[in-house]
Image (spheres, rainbow, N blue to C red):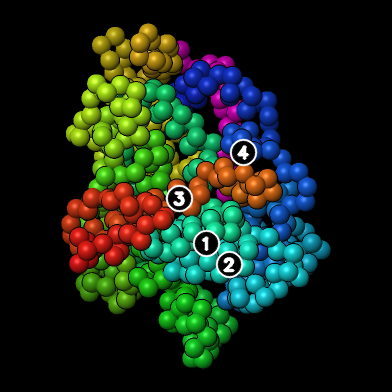
Protein backbone atom coordinates (compact mmCIF):
# COMPACT_ATOMS: atom_id res chain seq x y z
CA UNK A 1 0.00 0.00 0.00
CA UNK A 2 1.77 3.13 -1.24
CA UNK A 3 0.98 6.32 0.67
CA UNK A 4 2.32 9.86 0.75
CA UNK A 5 4.47 10.86 3.76
CA UNK A 6 1.55 12.97 5.02
CA UNK A 7 -0.88 10.04 4.76
CA UNK A 8 1.58 7.76 6.56
CA UNK A 9 1.96 10.33 9.34
CA UNK A 10 -1.83 10.45 9.76
CA UNK A 11 -1.96 6.65 9.86
CA UNK A 12 0.73 6.46 12.57
CA UNK A 13 -1.00 9.15 14.61
CA UNK A 14 -4.34 7.35 14.24
CA UNK A 15 -2.83 4.08 15.46
CA UNK A 16 -1.18 5.73 18.47
CA UNK A 17 -4.33 7.72 19.24
CA UNK A 18 -6.53 4.64 19.21
CA UNK A 19 -4.14 2.55 21.30
CA UNK A 20 -3.55 5.44 23.68
CA UNK A 21 -7.30 5.73 24.32
CA UNK A 22 -8.35 2.06 24.20
CA UNK A 23 -5.45 0.90 26.42
CA UNK A 24 -5.06 4.13 28.36
CA UNK A 25 -3.94 2.79 31.75
CA UNK A 26 -1.85 0.01 30.24
CA UNK A 27 0.03 2.42 27.98
CA UNK A 28 0.61 4.79 30.89
CA UNK A 29 2.21 1.91 32.76
CA UNK A 30 4.31 0.97 29.75
CA UNK A 31 5.48 4.57 29.33
CA UNK A 32 6.39 4.74 33.02
CA UNK A 33 8.31 1.47 32.79
CA UNK A 34 10.79 3.14 30.46
CA UNK A 35 13.00 0.08 29.98
CA UNK A 36 12.24 -3.60 30.05
CA UNK A 37 9.13 -3.15 27.89
CA UNK A 38 9.09 -6.84 26.95
CA UNK A 39 8.69 -7.85 30.58
CA UNK A 40 5.90 -5.30 31.08
CA UNK A 41 3.99 -6.26 27.93
CA UNK A 42 4.35 -10.00 28.09
CA UNK A 43 4.16 -10.60 31.82
CA UNK A 44 7.55 -11.89 32.79
CA UNK A 45 9.88 -10.50 35.43
CA UNK A 46 13.54 -9.64 35.62
CA UNK A 47 15.41 -12.88 36.04
CA UNK A 48 16.26 -13.83 39.59
CA UNK A 49 19.48 -15.78 40.05
CA UNK A 50 22.19 -16.52 37.49
CA UNK A 51 21.58 -16.09 33.75
CA UNK A 52 20.82 -19.29 31.84
CA UNK A 53 23.94 -20.82 30.29
CA UNK A 54 23.29 -21.08 26.56
CA UNK A 55 25.12 -22.23 23.42
CA UNK A 56 24.33 -21.06 19.89
CA UNK A 57 24.29 -23.81 17.27
CA UNK A 58 24.49 -22.21 13.84
CA UNK A 59 26.06 -18.76 13.58
CA UNK A 60 25.16 -17.63 10.08
CA UNK A 61 23.17 -14.47 9.40
CA UNK A 62 20.21 -15.27 11.65
CA UNK A 63 22.29 -16.83 14.39
CA UNK A 64 24.43 -13.71 14.59
CA UNK A 65 21.36 -11.46 14.68
CA UNK A 66 20.16 -13.41 17.72
CA UNK A 67 23.60 -13.26 19.33
CA UNK A 68 23.60 -9.51 18.74
CA UNK A 69 20.20 -9.21 20.46
CA UNK A 70 20.79 -11.71 23.25
CA UNK A 71 19.71 -10.45 26.70
CA UNK A 72 22.83 -10.64 28.88
CA UNK A 73 20.80 -10.22 32.11
CA UNK A 74 18.92 -13.43 31.28
CA UNK A 75 21.40 -15.39 29.18
CA UNK A 76 25.11 -16.20 29.35
CA UNK A 77 26.63 -17.37 26.07
CA UNK A 78 29.13 -20.09 26.95
CA UNK A 79 29.72 -21.69 23.53
CA UNK A 80 29.02 -21.59 19.80
CA UNK A 81 29.08 -24.31 17.14
CA UNK A 82 29.15 -23.98 13.36
CA UNK A 83 30.48 -26.08 10.51
CA UNK A 84 31.85 -23.06 8.63
CA UNK A 85 35.12 -21.40 9.76
CA UNK A 86 34.02 -18.03 8.37
CA UNK A 87 30.83 -18.10 10.44
CA UNK A 88 32.73 -18.95 13.59
CA UNK A 89 35.16 -16.10 12.95
CA UNK A 90 32.52 -13.44 12.26
CA UNK A 91 30.61 -14.44 15.37
CA UNK A 92 33.41 -12.69 17.24
CA UNK A 93 34.46 -9.97 14.80
CA UNK A 94 30.98 -9.04 13.52
CA UNK A 95 29.67 -8.57 9.99
CA UNK A 96 27.31 -5.58 10.36
CA UNK A 97 27.76 -2.43 12.45
CA UNK A 98 24.21 -2.63 13.88
CA UNK A 99 22.52 -6.00 13.28
CA UNK A 100 25.52 -8.35 13.70
CA UNK A 101 28.19 -6.59 15.75
CA UNK A 102 29.92 -9.73 16.98
CA UNK A 103 30.75 -11.03 20.45
CA UNK A 104 33.86 -8.89 20.84
CA UNK A 105 31.68 -5.78 20.62
CA UNK A 106 28.64 -7.18 22.44
CA UNK A 107 30.46 -8.78 25.38
CA UNK A 108 33.85 -7.10 25.25
CA UNK A 109 36.93 -8.99 24.09
CA UNK A 110 37.85 -10.34 27.53
CA UNK A 111 34.43 -11.96 28.10
CA UNK A 112 34.15 -13.06 24.46
CA UNK A 113 37.45 -14.92 24.73
CA UNK A 114 35.84 -17.21 27.34
CA UNK A 115 33.22 -18.46 24.86
CA UNK A 116 34.12 -21.98 23.68
CA UNK A 117 34.10 -22.71 19.94
CA UNK A 118 33.06 -26.02 18.35
CA UNK A 119 33.05 -27.24 14.76
CA UNK A 120 29.68 -28.98 15.11
CA UNK A 121 26.89 -29.53 17.62
CA UNK A 122 27.87 -33.10 18.46
CA UNK A 123 31.28 -32.06 19.73
CA UNK A 124 29.52 -29.34 21.72
CA UNK A 125 27.10 -31.82 23.33
CA UNK A 126 29.98 -34.02 24.48
CA UNK A 127 31.17 -31.09 26.63
CA UNK A 128 27.75 -30.00 27.90
CA UNK A 129 28.47 -30.95 31.52
CA UNK A 130 31.88 -29.27 31.53
CA UNK A 131 30.25 -26.14 30.14
CA UNK A 132 27.38 -26.26 32.63
CA UNK A 133 25.14 -25.98 29.57
CA UNK A 134 21.41 -25.57 30.19
CA UNK A 135 19.95 -24.59 26.83
CA UNK A 136 20.68 -24.05 23.14
CA UNK A 137 19.57 -21.64 20.43
CA UNK A 138 19.42 -23.42 17.06
CA UNK A 139 19.82 -21.44 13.84
CA UNK A 140 21.00 -24.05 11.34
CA UNK A 141 19.48 -24.81 7.89
CA UNK A 142 15.83 -25.89 8.03
CA UNK A 143 16.36 -29.60 7.30
CA UNK A 144 18.48 -29.89 10.46
CA UNK A 145 16.17 -28.01 12.87
CA UNK A 146 14.46 -31.16 14.08
CA UNK A 147 17.46 -33.56 14.10
CA UNK A 148 19.63 -31.10 16.05
CA UNK A 149 16.78 -30.08 18.37
CA UNK A 150 15.91 -33.70 19.18
CA UNK A 151 19.56 -34.53 19.96
CA UNK A 152 19.73 -31.50 22.27
CA UNK A 153 16.43 -32.33 23.98
CA UNK A 154 17.57 -35.91 24.50
CA UNK A 155 20.71 -34.46 26.11
CA UNK A 156 18.44 -32.68 28.62
CA UNK A 157 18.77 -29.18 27.16
CA UNK A 158 16.04 -26.58 26.67
CA UNK A 159 15.68 -25.45 23.03
CA UNK A 160 14.87 -22.24 21.20
CA UNK A 161 14.77 -23.14 17.51
CA UNK A 162 14.60 -20.70 14.63
CA UNK A 163 11.55 -20.82 12.40
CA UNK A 164 10.26 -22.68 10.42
CA UNK A 165 9.99 -25.20 13.22
CA UNK A 166 10.89 -28.21 11.05
CA UNK A 167 10.84 -29.44 7.48
CA UNK A 168 7.92 -31.80 8.08
CA UNK A 169 4.96 -31.82 10.44
CA UNK A 170 5.98 -35.29 11.61
CA UNK A 171 9.32 -33.81 12.72
CA UNK A 172 7.50 -30.97 14.54
CA UNK A 173 5.55 -33.54 16.52
CA UNK A 174 8.73 -35.42 17.38
CA UNK A 175 10.24 -32.22 18.79
CA UNK A 176 7.14 -31.49 20.88
CA UNK A 177 6.94 -35.01 22.27
CA UNK A 178 10.64 -35.09 23.16
CA UNK A 179 10.30 -31.78 25.04
CA UNK A 180 7.11 -32.91 26.81
CA UNK A 181 8.65 -36.23 27.83
CA UNK A 182 11.54 -34.43 29.56
CA UNK A 183 9.63 -31.35 30.79
CA UNK A 184 11.91 -29.05 28.76
CA UNK A 185 11.09 -25.63 27.33
CA UNK A 186 10.76 -25.72 23.54
CA UNK A 187 10.37 -22.29 21.94
CA UNK A 188 10.36 -21.35 18.24
CA UNK A 189 11.47 -18.01 16.81
CA UNK A 190 8.31 -16.51 15.34
CA UNK A 191 9.22 -13.20 16.95
CA UNK A 192 5.98 -11.36 16.15
CA UNK A 193 4.58 -13.03 19.28
CA UNK A 194 6.97 -10.78 21.22
CA UNK A 195 6.56 -7.56 19.22
CA UNK A 196 4.93 -4.72 21.18
CA UNK A 197 3.74 -3.29 17.85
CA UNK A 198 1.92 -6.48 16.87
CA UNK A 199 0.63 -6.92 20.41
CA UNK A 200 -1.08 -3.53 20.24
CA UNK A 201 -2.41 -4.09 16.74
CA UNK A 202 -3.82 -7.48 17.74
CA UNK A 203 -5.42 -5.89 20.81
CA UNK A 204 -7.09 -3.36 18.51
CA UNK A 205 -8.48 -6.17 16.34
CA UNK A 206 -9.69 -8.19 19.33
CA UNK A 207 -11.49 -5.16 20.80
CA UNK A 208 -13.48 -4.88 17.60
CA UNK A 209 -12.12 -1.48 16.58
CA UNK A 210 -11.50 -2.77 13.05
CA UNK A 211 -14.93 -4.38 12.87
CA UNK A 212 -15.37 -7.69 11.09
CA UNK A 213 -12.07 -8.75 9.48
CA UNK A 214 -12.82 -10.49 6.22
CA UNK A 215 -9.48 -10.02 4.41
CA UNK A 216 -5.79 -9.81 5.24
CA UNK A 217 -3.28 -9.15 2.48
CA UNK A 218 0.33 -10.07 3.20
CA UNK A 219 3.37 -9.85 0.96
CA UNK A 220 7.13 -10.10 1.05
CA UNK A 221 8.43 -9.03 -2.33
CA UNK A 222 12.04 -8.78 -3.42
CA UNK A 223 13.82 -8.12 -6.69
CA UNK A 224 16.66 -10.53 -7.33
CA UNK A 225 16.47 -10.24 -11.11
CA UNK A 226 19.65 -8.21 -11.46
CA UNK A 227 22.92 -10.15 -11.98
CA UNK A 228 24.32 -11.59 -8.73
CA UNK A 229 21.67 -9.82 -6.64
CA UNK A 230 20.07 -12.82 -4.91
CA UNK A 231 21.18 -12.81 -1.26
CA UNK A 232 20.26 -16.50 -1.00
CA UNK A 233 22.99 -17.42 -3.52
CA UNK A 234 26.09 -17.42 -1.33
CA UNK A 235 28.33 -20.08 -2.88
CA UNK A 236 30.04 -17.70 -5.27
CA UNK A 237 30.97 -15.25 -2.52
CA UNK A 238 31.80 -17.82 0.16
CA UNK A 239 35.34 -17.81 1.53
CA UNK A 240 37.63 -20.38 -0.02
CA UNK A 241 38.48 -21.90 3.37
CA UNK A 242 34.78 -22.68 3.84
CA UNK A 243 34.50 -24.28 0.42
CA UNK A 244 37.68 -26.32 0.90
CA UNK A 245 36.71 -27.61 4.36
CA UNK A 246 33.11 -28.44 3.44
CA UNK A 247 34.19 -30.15 0.22
CA UNK A 248 36.65 -32.25 2.26
CA UNK A 249 33.82 -33.18 4.67
CA UNK A 250 31.63 -33.99 1.69
CA UNK A 251 34.19 -36.41 0.25
CA UNK A 252 34.74 -38.11 3.61
CA UNK A 253 31.02 -38.63 4.16
CA UNK A 254 31.00 -36.61 7.38
CA UNK A 255 28.95 -33.83 5.81
CA UNK A 256 26.21 -36.27 4.81
CA UNK A 257 26.22 -37.69 8.34
CA UNK A 258 25.52 -34.15 9.57
CA UNK A 259 22.59 -33.80 7.16
CA UNK A 260 23.91 -32.18 3.97
CA UNK A 261 24.32 -33.86 0.58
CA UNK A 262 26.91 -31.41 -0.75
CA UNK A 263 28.95 -28.42 0.36
CA UNK A 264 27.04 -26.23 -2.07
CA UNK A 265 23.69 -27.25 -0.59
CA UNK A 266 24.87 -26.36 2.89
CA UNK A 267 25.94 -22.87 1.87
CA UNK A 268 22.99 -22.19 -0.48
CA UNK A 269 20.55 -24.22 1.63
CA UNK A 270 17.56 -21.92 1.10
CA UNK A 271 17.50 -22.74 -2.63
CA UNK A 272 17.03 -26.51 -2.39
CA UNK A 273 14.12 -28.71 -1.35
CA UNK A 274 16.43 -31.12 0.48
CA UNK A 275 17.62 -28.39 2.86
CA UNK A 276 15.02 -25.59 2.86
CA UNK A 277 11.32 -24.91 2.49
CA UNK A 278 11.14 -22.16 -0.11
CA UNK A 279 9.64 -18.70 0.03
CA UNK A 280 6.58 -19.75 2.02
CA UNK A 281 8.68 -21.28 4.81
CA UNK A 282 11.45 -18.69 4.99
CA UNK A 283 9.30 -15.58 4.54
CA UNK A 284 5.61 -16.39 4.39
CA UNK A 285 5.47 -18.34 7.64
CA UNK A 286 6.04 -15.08 9.55
CA UNK A 287 3.00 -13.52 7.91
CA UNK A 288 0.72 -16.51 8.15
CA UNK A 289 1.62 -16.46 11.84
CA UNK A 290 0.72 -12.74 11.99
CA UNK A 291 -2.60 -13.36 10.23
CA UNK A 292 -3.48 -16.06 12.73
CA UNK A 293 -2.65 -13.67 15.60
CA UNK A 294 -4.94 -10.96 14.17
CA UNK A 295 -7.75 -13.49 13.73
CA UNK A 296 -7.48 -14.78 17.31
CA UNK A 297 -4.83 -17.51 16.85
CA UNK A 298 -7.29 -19.78 15.06
CA UNK A 299 -6.32 -22.67 12.81
CA UNK A 300 -7.03 -22.27 9.07
CA UNK A 301 -9.68 -24.17 7.13
CA UNK A 302 -8.06 -24.54 3.69
CA UNK A 303 -5.24 -23.37 1.43
CA UNK A 304 -4.59 -23.21 -2.30
CA UNK A 305 -2.13 -21.40 -4.50
CA UNK A 306 0.29 -21.15 -7.37
CA UNK A 307 4.06 -21.43 -7.25
CA UNK A 308 6.56 -21.52 -10.08
CA UNK A 309 10.14 -21.06 -11.21
CA UNK A 310 9.11 -18.29 -13.57
CA UNK A 311 12.40 -16.42 -13.78
CA UNK A 312 15.45 -18.34 -12.59
CA UNK A 313 16.59 -21.16 -14.86
CA UNK A 314 14.68 -19.92 -17.92
CA UNK A 315 17.04 -19.11 -20.77
CA UNK A 316 16.30 -15.81 -22.44
CA UNK A 317 14.20 -14.45 -19.57
CA UNK A 318 16.79 -12.75 -17.40
CA UNK A 319 20.49 -12.00 -17.21
CA UNK A 320 22.86 -14.85 -18.04
CA UNK A 321 23.51 -15.50 -14.34
CA UNK A 322 19.84 -16.44 -13.96
CA UNK A 323 19.63 -18.82 -16.95
CA UNK A 324 21.62 -21.70 -15.51
CA UNK A 325 20.36 -21.32 -11.95
CA UNK A 326 19.74 -24.81 -10.55
CA UNK A 327 17.55 -23.93 -7.57
CA UNK A 328 14.67 -26.20 -6.66
CA UNK A 329 12.46 -23.63 -4.97
CA UNK A 330 9.90 -21.43 -6.73
CA UNK A 331 10.77 -17.80 -7.35
CA UNK A 332 7.13 -16.61 -7.43
CA UNK A 333 4.39 -17.85 -5.09
CA UNK A 334 0.79 -16.75 -4.49
CA UNK A 335 -1.39 -18.52 -1.92
CA UNK A 336 -4.85 -18.06 -0.44
CA UNK A 337 -5.87 -19.28 3.00
CA UNK A 338 -9.37 -19.53 4.45
CA UNK A 339 -9.80 -18.95 8.20
CA UNK A 340 -12.97 -19.39 10.26
CA UNK A 341 -14.90 -16.26 11.17
CA UNK A 342 -16.27 -15.88 14.70
CA UNK A 343 -19.59 -17.57 13.89
CA UNK A 344 -18.04 -20.41 11.88
CA UNK A 345 -18.75 -23.83 13.48
CA UNK A 346 -15.04 -24.44 14.11
CA UNK A 347 -14.18 -21.09 15.68
CA UNK A 348 -13.38 -21.40 19.42
CA UNK A 349 -15.58 -18.40 20.27
CA UNK A 350 -18.55 -19.93 18.49
CA UNK A 351 -17.98 -23.31 20.12
CA UNK A 352 -17.92 -21.61 23.54
CA UNK A 353 -21.07 -19.64 22.70
CA UNK A 354 -22.89 -22.81 21.63
CA UNK A 355 -22.13 -24.34 25.03
CA UNK A 356 -23.67 -21.31 26.71
CA UNK A 357 -26.63 -20.92 24.37
CA UNK A 358 -27.93 -23.76 22.23
CA UNK A 359 -29.79 -21.24 20.05
CA UNK A 360 -26.56 -19.58 18.88
CA UNK A 361 -26.33 -19.71 15.10
CA UNK A 362 -23.34 -21.14 13.24
CA UNK A 363 -22.50 -20.00 9.74
CA UNK A 364 -20.17 -22.06 7.56
CA UNK A 365 -19.92 -19.14 5.13
CA UNK A 366 -18.36 -16.94 7.83
CA UNK A 367 -14.83 -17.11 6.46
CA UNK A 368 -11.89 -14.69 6.54
CA UNK A 369 -9.49 -14.80 3.61
CA UNK A 370 -5.73 -14.29 3.82
CA UNK A 371 -3.62 -13.90 0.69
CA UNK A 372 0.16 -14.14 0.65
CA UNK A 373 2.51 -13.37 -2.22
CA UNK A 374 6.27 -13.53 -2.51
CA UNK A 375 8.17 -12.88 -5.72
CA UNK A 376 11.74 -12.34 -6.83
CA UNK A 377 11.28 -9.81 -9.62
CA UNK A 378 9.65 -6.73 -8.05
CA UNK A 379 9.79 -5.06 -4.62
CA UNK A 380 7.53 -2.09 -5.24
CA UNK A 381 5.75 -2.39 -1.90
CA UNK A 382 7.43 -2.92 1.48
CA UNK A 383 6.84 -6.25 3.16
CA UNK A 384 4.08 -6.48 5.73
CA UNK A 385 0.38 -7.09 6.23
CA UNK A 386 -2.77 -5.06 5.62
CA UNK A 387 -5.72 -6.04 7.82
CA UNK A 388 -9.03 -4.99 6.26
CA UNK A 389 -11.97 -4.69 8.67
CA UNK A 390 -15.50 -3.40 8.20
CA UNK A 391 -14.70 -0.37 10.42
CA UNK A 392 -11.03 0.22 9.74
CA UNK A 393 -7.77 -0.94 8.18
CA UNK A 394 -4.40 -1.49 9.85
CA UNK A 395 -1.25 -1.60 7.75
CA UNK A 396 1.79 -3.30 9.33
CA UNK A 397 4.92 -2.07 7.60
CA UNK A 398 8.27 -3.91 7.86
CA UNK A 399 7.63 -4.85 11.52
CA UNK A 400 8.46 -1.26 12.53
CA UNK A 401 5.32 0.81 11.87
CA UNK A 402 1.55 0.43 12.17
CA UNK A 403 -0.88 2.69 10.33
CA UNK A 404 -4.62 2.92 11.04
CA UNK A 405 -7.32 4.28 8.74
CA UNK A 406 -11.04 4.54 9.43
CA UNK A 407 -13.78 3.38 7.09
CA UNK A 408 -16.32 6.04 6.14
CA UNK A 409 -19.71 5.68 7.84
CA UNK A 410 -23.05 7.46 7.62
CA UNK A 411 -22.08 10.20 10.05
CA UNK A 412 -18.28 10.12 9.93
CA UNK A 413 -15.78 10.37 7.07
CA UNK A 414 -12.86 8.00 6.62
CA UNK A 415 -9.92 7.35 4.33
CA UNK A 416 -6.17 7.82 4.31
CA UNK A 417 -6.33 11.56 5.03
CA UNK A 418 -8.80 11.40 7.90
CA UNK A 419 -7.68 11.58 11.51
CA UNK A 420 -9.64 9.42 13.95
CA UNK A 421 -10.00 8.53 17.60
CA UNK A 422 -11.88 6.05 19.79
CA UNK A 423 -15.30 6.69 21.30
CA UNK A 424 -17.64 4.44 23.27
CA UNK A 425 -20.73 3.14 21.52
CA UNK A 426 -23.58 1.57 23.49
CA UNK A 427 -24.16 -2.03 22.60
CA UNK A 428 -21.29 -2.35 20.10
CA UNK A 429 -18.20 -1.56 22.16
CA UNK A 430 -15.58 1.08 21.26
CA UNK A 431 -15.64 2.48 17.73
CA UNK A 432 -13.56 4.83 15.62
CA UNK A 433 -14.76 8.36 15.00
CA UNK A 434 -13.27 11.19 12.93
CA UNK A 435 -12.02 14.49 14.27
CA UNK A 436 -10.61 17.69 12.86
CA UNK A 437 -7.48 18.48 14.87
CA UNK A 438 -4.22 18.34 12.94
CA UNK A 439 -2.07 17.12 15.84
CA UNK A 440 -2.00 13.94 17.93
CA UNK A 441 -3.38 14.12 21.46
CA UNK A 442 -1.68 13.38 24.78
CA UNK A 443 -3.05 9.81 24.56
CA UNK A 444 -1.26 9.28 21.24
CA UNK A 445 1.98 10.59 22.69
CA UNK A 446 1.61 8.26 25.69
CA UNK A 447 1.09 5.31 23.34
CA UNK A 448 4.21 6.21 21.40
CA UNK A 449 6.23 6.41 24.62
CA UNK A 450 4.71 3.13 25.76
CA UNK A 451 6.06 1.31 22.70
CA UNK A 452 9.54 2.75 23.18
CA UNK A 453 11.68 5.10 21.09
CA UNK A 454 12.75 2.23 18.82
CA UNK A 455 10.30 -0.50 17.88
CA UNK A 456 11.73 -3.92 18.76
CA UNK A 457 11.21 -6.80 16.36
CA UNK A 458 10.90 -9.14 19.35
CA UNK A 459 14.16 -11.12 19.20
CA UNK A 460 15.39 -9.98 22.60
CA UNK A 461 11.97 -10.39 24.21
CA UNK A 462 11.50 -13.97 22.96
CA UNK A 463 14.90 -14.95 24.39
CA UNK A 464 14.20 -13.17 27.68
CA UNK A 465 10.89 -14.92 28.16
CA UNK A 466 12.33 -18.31 27.20
CA UNK A 467 15.07 -17.91 29.84
CA UNK A 468 12.49 -16.67 32.36
CA UNK A 469 10.36 -19.79 31.77
CA UNK A 470 13.42 -22.03 32.08
CA UNK A 471 14.31 -20.50 35.46
CA UNK A 472 10.77 -20.41 36.85
CA UNK A 473 9.42 -23.59 35.28
CA UNK A 474 6.37 -21.71 34.00
CA UNK A 475 4.63 -22.90 30.84
CA UNK A 476 3.86 -19.47 29.40
CA UNK A 477 5.84 -19.37 26.14
CA UNK A 478 3.90 -17.38 23.57
CA UNK A 479 5.37 -19.38 20.68
CA UNK A 480 5.78 -22.87 22.08
CA UNK A 481 5.99 -26.02 19.99
CA UNK A 482 2.24 -26.34 19.48
CA UNK A 483 1.83 -22.74 18.32
CA UNK A 484 4.85 -23.01 16.04
CA UNK A 485 3.67 -26.32 14.61
CA UNK A 486 0.46 -24.62 13.45
CA UNK A 487 2.59 -22.11 11.54
CA UNK A 488 4.63 -24.93 10.04
CA UNK A 489 1.46 -26.77 9.02
CA UNK A 490 0.24 -23.70 7.14
CA UNK A 491 3.53 -23.20 5.30
CA UNK A 492 4.24 -26.85 4.52
CA UNK A 493 0.67 -27.54 3.40
CA UNK A 494 0.94 -24.44 1.21
CA UNK A 495 3.93 -26.02 -0.53
CA UNK A 496 1.90 -29.21 -1.04
CA UNK A 497 -1.07 -27.25 -2.42
CA UNK A 498 1.18 -25.50 -4.93
CA UNK A 499 3.04 -28.68 -5.89
CA UNK A 500 -0.15 -30.74 -6.39
CA UNK A 501 -2.18 -27.82 -7.76
CA UNK A 502 -5.14 -28.45 -5.47
CA UNK A 503 -7.13 -26.83 -2.69
CA UNK A 504 -6.31 -28.63 0.56
CA UNK A 505 -8.54 -28.64 3.63
CA UNK A 506 -6.68 -28.73 6.95
CA UNK A 507 -7.46 -31.68 9.21
CA UNK A 508 -7.73 -31.29 13.02
CA UNK A 509 -5.50 -34.31 13.67
CA UNK A 510 -2.58 -32.59 11.93
CA UNK A 511 -2.53 -30.08 14.79
CA UNK A 512 -2.52 -32.79 17.47
CA UNK A 513 1.04 -33.72 18.57
CA UNK A 514 -0.19 -37.08 19.87
CA UNK A 515 -1.48 -38.09 16.42
CA UNK A 516 0.72 -39.55 13.67
CA UNK A 517 -1.35 -37.77 11.01
CA UNK A 518 0.50 -35.19 8.91
CA UNK A 519 -0.16 -33.47 5.59
CA UNK A 520 3.02 -34.81 3.96
CA UNK A 521 1.78 -38.40 4.48
CA UNK A 522 -1.95 -37.80 4.01
CA UNK A 523 -3.31 -40.06 1.22
CA UNK A 524 -5.85 -37.40 0.22
CA UNK A 525 -2.90 -35.19 -0.77
CA UNK A 526 -0.01 -37.41 -1.78
CA UNK A 527 -1.73 -40.74 -2.33
Q: Which residue is drawn at 43% across and 59% down?
A: 173
- Residue ID for mark 2: 154
In reply to whether residue 44 is colored magenta, the answer given is no
> Which SS class for mark 4?
helix
Compute the Cα span from label 1 to label 4.
Answer: 29 Å
- CB contact under 8 Å: marks 2 and 3: no
Q: How crowded is mark 2: few (under 14 residues within 10 Å), some or many (20 or more)?
A: some
Closer mark to the observer between disc 1 and disc 3: 1
Separation of marks 2 and 3 at Cα, in angstroms: 19 Å
The residue where tag 4 is placed is: 38
Q: Is residue 358 above or below residue 372?
A: above
What range is drawn magenta here? 437-461
Residue 216 numbered mark, or none: none
Horizontal side of 445 relative to 294 (left or right) equals: right
Secondary-structure class at tag 3: helix
Q: Is residue 375 in view?
A: no
In the rendered structure, find residue 482 and report the number of the disc placed on it: 3
Label 1 close to label 4 by CB (< 8 Å): no
Read off the residue under disc 1.
178
Given residues 459 and 208, the one toward you in this image is 208
Check if mark 1's residue and mark 2's residue have beta carbons within 8 Å.
yes
Residue 392 image-quadrant placement:
top left
Amino acid sequence: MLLTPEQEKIGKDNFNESIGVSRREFMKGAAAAGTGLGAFYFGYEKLKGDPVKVAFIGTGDEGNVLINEHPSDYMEIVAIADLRPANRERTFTGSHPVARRGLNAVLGQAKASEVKVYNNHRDLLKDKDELGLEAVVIAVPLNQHAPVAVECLQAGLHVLCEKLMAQTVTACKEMINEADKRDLKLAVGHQRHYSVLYDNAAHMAQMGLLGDIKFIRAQWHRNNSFPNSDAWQKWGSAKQEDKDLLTKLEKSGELKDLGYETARKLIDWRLYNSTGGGLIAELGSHQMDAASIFLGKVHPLAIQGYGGKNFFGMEGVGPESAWDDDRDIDDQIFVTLEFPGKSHPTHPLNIAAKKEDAKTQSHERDVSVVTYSSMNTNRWEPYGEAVFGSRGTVVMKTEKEALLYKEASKDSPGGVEQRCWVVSSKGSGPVLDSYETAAPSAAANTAQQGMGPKISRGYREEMEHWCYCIRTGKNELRCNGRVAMADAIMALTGNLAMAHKKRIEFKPEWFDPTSDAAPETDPDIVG
